Image (cartoon, helix red, strand yellow):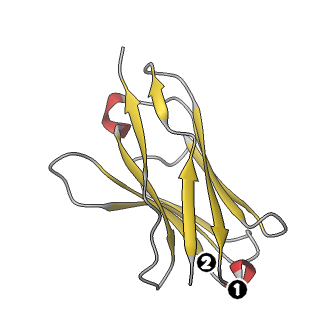
Amino acid sequence: QAHLVESGGGLVQPGGSLSLSCAASGFVFSAWDMSWYRQAPGKERELVASIGMVGRRKNYSDSVKGRFIISRDNRANTVSLQMNNLKPEDTAVYYCHIVRSNSWGQGTQVTVSS
């Protein structure tokens, strides 16, 4: 059974940076595309970024393009999200997700505020 554990969230000032990490286990990590989603209070969960199995194909939502970087390490079974130039509207719970599956992590809170 797939298991995803996010870490790295926290409180950061506008313009700051955070790095999120997702540790995966219980499945063949290198055989699946991975993604990060986020959900702000009162809003639907939205796709932030996705990455292909070998890490070459990457896609970003328009709202984070140029500020966030998704990466993965298939030896360590981790997928990461480097978030730069954070804005208050980036405040949300961030979730790790196996693309085309029902597997989600428990989420990690990111709060951008002065």
Lateral position of residue 70 relative to residue 64, left or right: right
Quarter of the image holding residue 17? top right
Residue furthest top in the image: 114
The residue that appears at 74% across and 67% down in the rendered structure is 77
Please tell me which residue is depicted at 71% across the width and 84% down the height of the picture: 28
Task: Name above or below for residue 2 compared with residue 79.
Answer: below
Question: x and y percent of residue 62 in the render?
Answer: 41, 53
Q: Write down the residue under mark 2.
A: 33
Picture residue at 53% right of the left edge, 67% below the top = 35
Q: Looking at this view, is 82 or 41 the one in front? A: 41
Residue 16's mark? none
The local crowd at label 1, few if under 14, some if 14 to 19, many if 20 or more residues have their Cα within 10 Å, is few
Amino acid at circle 2: Asp
**Relative horizontal placement of residue 105, taking residue 38 as reference (left or right):** right
Name the residue: 43% across, 57% down. 61
Residue on which the image places disc 1: 31
SS for dot 2: loop
